[in-house]
Image (tube, rainbow, N blue to C red):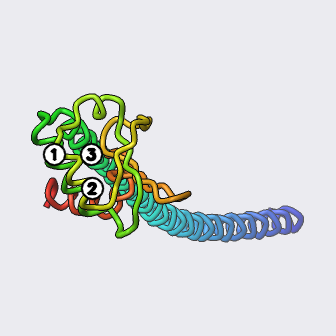
């Protein structure tokens, strides 16, 4: 082998060794980068999974909360409808009383709502046509004169003292007492 061949072989061997070393380093760097990238990807995947679990839990909680609110609203509405039904039934029951029972209620109302002043009492046209004779005595005892003019009400009466009217119709009395009675009726119906 000549000197030139030896030099070329030596250069070739050194180039192969250098290339092998560079390739080995590149493989090591590649494996390190791949390992580091895989670890980073795993870490990111775990973080995303944790965040997804948190997001899903929060979404489930919001949905449950919304569902509970809707359920409470529906139950409240149903309760209010039942309470309203009680008031409507009470009004219907008052109007449907036989004459004796109806005017017994009217007498008690006169005693309760009449003041010490002189005034007039007006009834509906229906009530005026069926007033019992002894009701005039109750009115008189409470310083009230029965008006021949009918009031535009379904039941009950209207007291008038000069320019002041007190509407004691069943509808108005139930409506003005509704707030106080609503809680009581709710307690009776729903405990």
Which corner quadrant of the image does residue 182 belong to?
bottom left
Give the class, few, some or many, for how many residues have Cα within 10 Å of label 3's Cα (few <14, many ≥20): some
Nearest-to-viewer mark from 1 and 3? 1
Q: Which mark is residue 140?
A: 2
Pick whichever of labels 1 and 3 is earlier in the sequence. Answer: 3
The one nearer the camera, 161 or 186, is: 161
Q: Look at 79% across and 63% down and name the residue there.
A: 12
The residue drawn where x is 22% and y is 44% is 86
Q: Quadrant of residue 87?
A: top left
The residue to which callout 3 is attached is 87
User: Is 40 above or below relative to 80?
Assistant: below
Mark 1: secondary structure = helix
Q: Is residue 103 left or right of residue 70?
A: left
Quadrant housing the C terminus: bottom left
Mark 2 neighbour class, 10 Å CA radius: few under 14, some 14 to 19, many 20 or more: some
Depth check, front residue: 165 or 87: 165
Percent from the top left, x then y, of residue 57?
39, 61
Between the residue at mark 2 and the residue at mark 3, the CA separation in whole angstroms equals 31 Å
């Amino acid at each position: 082998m000549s000197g030139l061949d030896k030099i070329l072989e030596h250069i070739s061997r050194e180039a192969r060794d250098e290339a092998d070393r560079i390739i080995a380093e590149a493989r090591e760097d590649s494996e390190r980068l791949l390992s580091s990238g895989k670890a980073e990807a795993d870490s990111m995947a775990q973080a995303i999974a944790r965040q997804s679990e948190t997001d899903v839990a929060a979404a489930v909680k919001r949905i449950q909360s919304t569902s509970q609110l809707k359920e409470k609203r529906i139950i409240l509405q149903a309760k209010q409808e039942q309470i309203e039904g009680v008031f409507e039934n009470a009004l219907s029951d008052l109007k449907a009383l036989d004459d004796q029972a109806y005017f017994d209620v009217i007498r008690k109302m006169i005693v309760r709502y009449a003041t010490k002043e002189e005034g007039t009492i007006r009834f509906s046209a229906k009530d005026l046509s069926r007033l019992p004779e002894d009701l005039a005595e109750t009115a008189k005892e409470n310083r009230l004169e029965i008006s021949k003019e009918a009031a535009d009400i379904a039941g009950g009466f209207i007291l008038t003292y000069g320019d002041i009217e007190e509407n004691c119709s069943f509808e108005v009395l139930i409506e003005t007492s509704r707030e106080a009675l609503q809680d009581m009726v709710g307690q009776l119906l729903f405990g």
